[in-house]
Image (tube, grey):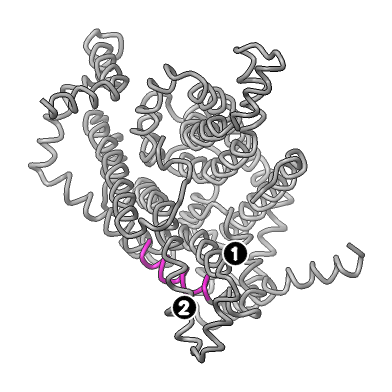
């Protein structure tokens, strides 16, 4: 892509945001009965500058993201192990598949009050909540990915001398990577909701706690500035994830 | 005889759940864990009956379900219109595509304090937050479904004199029926989660509100009963959708992870 093409794409992509910002400003100026309840762009930008200068935003954001990605990482490790073992070994499948089926549709945030009771207020509760919520989508996708390994691949590997116990790590696991990537992206989107929910319900720190405090104390310009930061972070991480996995799995034919 | 064999098969399939229940009961009764953390499973039906008689089970459940379904219905209405319109209009596509792309991965729950500020603590906040959470995946689902319609079909309809409205009714809408089911199936759990969670955080009645209240009162059996009710509702709703889709969409082949686990 040439430079001018890139520039044109960027301009075309940002156009809608400019229009949206203008609409927001107009709504803030004319529609809102009370301007503090619907702060304009100037107030939000000023709050954003003040927030980025101090430690409050960054430290809380850092804590939340650490909880979030630790829970997600644990869920990937446990979910992929469990899902691929279920695909390979009928005994594991017979045991775990009813458990997965029964708990799949539980709204996982309902466990947060229970976790508070068991583990108390703090990072352990938040990380565990994220872990539990992210686990099942990854298990299910990893299971289906490993189950759908083409038989020809398994037969060829066996014919070329791959021992039985090596079929799972050497053939089924690589073959299920695209599905695991999809399941992890679903879990990624989910993880933020759970982190924020856990922090809003009971926590001493974190970005969810921060917006809740801003909302409760009437600092609405700070509230919107913080939400804007969350949206941007979630979008950038999602884009980076998609680009990275597309590069790593470029052998796969994505639909 | 057939019935007995069926029951035995079901029990054999669900043996891990039976084991789990026995394990739960054993741990709770053995005194290893305080009943404050884990009441015996056998104590829960009594709690459930008590809650039911006090009207603390069905009434909050009805409130939560009303909010979840109303929010989802609103999201379906807006999402289907925007999604199909995006596939027909270049200008709208230019405007909406980047906004949807940025809004889609954002955790919409972060807007909860804003919605409380604008719409209060009652039904409206929860319904709108559910709609806001569900509308972007629905837009994408309908946009993809309408876009996947072969242009040949639309050209044929046009050359035979179909108006834009007729193309919509005869070509685009039927092509979007599978997307309707897929988006409902994906977003109904989201709607339930957002409803329960918002109720848990800011209160304002509903099952989520009662759940956090019971937890703060250290009324653990009630907490467990509410969680099990939420689990049952999730299972029930998912199976109803699957059943309906099989009825309505027998012709449409679809396999997604999670259909059968």
Say whether residue B164 is left or right of residue B261. Answer: right
- Quadrant of the frame with the C terminus of chain B: top left
Say whether residue A112 is left or right of residue A236. Answer: left
Q: Which residues are magenta?
A: B72-84
Whether residues under marks 1 and 2 lie with C-beta atoms below 8 angstroms apart, the answer is: no
Quarter where residue A30 is shown = bottom right
Q: How many marks?
A: 2
Q: Which subunit holds the residue at mark 2?
A: A
- Secondary structure, mark 2, is loop
Residue placed under numbered mark 2 in the picture? A33
Taking the view exactly as shown, the residue that stands out farthest to the left is B53
Q: Position of residue A152 (x, y in %)?
A: 63, 29
Say whether residue B248 is left or right of residue B92. Answer: left
Residue in front for this viewpoint, B204 or B221: B221
Q: Is residue B175 above or below residue B247?
A: below
Residue in front for this viewpoint, A94 or A184: A94
Quarter where residue B180 is shown = bottom left
Residue placed under numbered mark 1 in the picture? B100
Residue B245 lies in the magenta-colored region: no
Q: Residue at x 52, y 35 (%)?
A: A144
How crowded is the residue under tag 2: few (<14 C-alpha within 10 Å), some, or many (20+)?
Answer: few
How crowded is the residue under tag 1: few (<14 C-alpha within 10 Å), some, or many (20+)?
Answer: some
Quarter where residue A225 is shown = bottom right
Q: Residue at x 47, y 34 (%)?
A: A136
């Amino acid at each position: 892509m040439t430079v001018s093409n890139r520039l044109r794409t960027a301009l075309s992509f940002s156009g809608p945001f400019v229009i949206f910002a203008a609409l927001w400003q107009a709504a803030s100026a004319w529609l809102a009965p009370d301007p503090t309840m619907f702060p304009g762009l100037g107030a939000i930008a000023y709050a954003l500058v003040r927030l980025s200068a101090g430690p409050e935003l960054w430290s809380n954001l850092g804590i939340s993201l650490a909880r979030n990605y630790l829970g997600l990482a644990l869920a990937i490790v446990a979910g992929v192990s469990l899902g691929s073992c279920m695909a390979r070994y009928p005994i594991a499948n017979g045991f775990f598949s009813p458990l997965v089926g029964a708990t799949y549709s539980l709204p996982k945030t309902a466990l947060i009050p229970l976790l508070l009771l068991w583990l108390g207020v703090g990072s352990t509760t938040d990380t565990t909540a994220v872990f539990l919520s992210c686990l099942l989508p990854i298990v299910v996708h990893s299971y289906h990915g490993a189950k759908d390994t083409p038989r020809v691949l398994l037969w060829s590997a066996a014919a070329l001398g791959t021992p039985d116990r090596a079929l799972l790590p050497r053939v089924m696991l690589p073959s299920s990577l695209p599905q695991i990537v999809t399941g992890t992206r679903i879990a990624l989107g989910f993880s933020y909701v759970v982190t924020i929910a856990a922090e809003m319900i009971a926590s001493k720190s974190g970005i969810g706690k921060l917006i809740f405090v801003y909302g409760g104390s009437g600092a609405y310009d700070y509230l919107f500035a913080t939400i804007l930061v969350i949206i941007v972070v979630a979008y950038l991480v999602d884009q980076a994830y998609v680009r990275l996995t597309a590069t790593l799995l470029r052998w796969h034919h994505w639909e | 005889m057939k019935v007995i064999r069926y029951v035995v098969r079901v029990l054999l399939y669900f043996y891990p759940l039976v084991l789990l229940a026995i394990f739960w009961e054993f741990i709770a009764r053995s005194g290893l864990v305080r009943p404050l953390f884990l009441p015996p499973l056998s104590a829960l039906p009594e709690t459930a009956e008590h809650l039911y008689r006090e009207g603390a089970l069905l009434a909050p459940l009805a409130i939560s379900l009303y909010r979840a379904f109303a929010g989802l219905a609103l999201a379906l209405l807006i999402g289907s219109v925007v999604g199909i319109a995006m596939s027909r209009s270049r200008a709208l596509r230019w405007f909406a595509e980047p906004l949807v792309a940025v809004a889609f991965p954002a955790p919409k729950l972060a807007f909860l304090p804003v919605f409380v500020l604008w719409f209060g603590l009652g039904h409206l906040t929860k319904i709108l937050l559910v709609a806001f959470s569900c509308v972007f995946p629905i837009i994408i689902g309908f946009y993809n479904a309408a876009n996947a319609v072969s242009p040949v079909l639309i050209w044929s309809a046009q050359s035979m004199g179909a108006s834009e409205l007729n193309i919509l009714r005869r070509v685009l809408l039927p092509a979007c029926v599978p997307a309707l089911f897929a988006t409902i199936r994906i977003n109904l759990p989201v709607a339930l989660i957002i409803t329960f969670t918002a109720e848990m955080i800011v209160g304002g009645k509903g099952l989520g509100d009662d759940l956090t209240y019971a937890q703060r009162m250290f009324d653990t059996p009630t907490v467990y009963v509410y969680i099990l009710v939420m689990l049952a509702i999730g299972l029930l709703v998912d199976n109803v959708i699957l059943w309906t889709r099989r009825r309505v969409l027998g012709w449409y082949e679809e396999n997604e992870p999670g259909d059968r686990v």
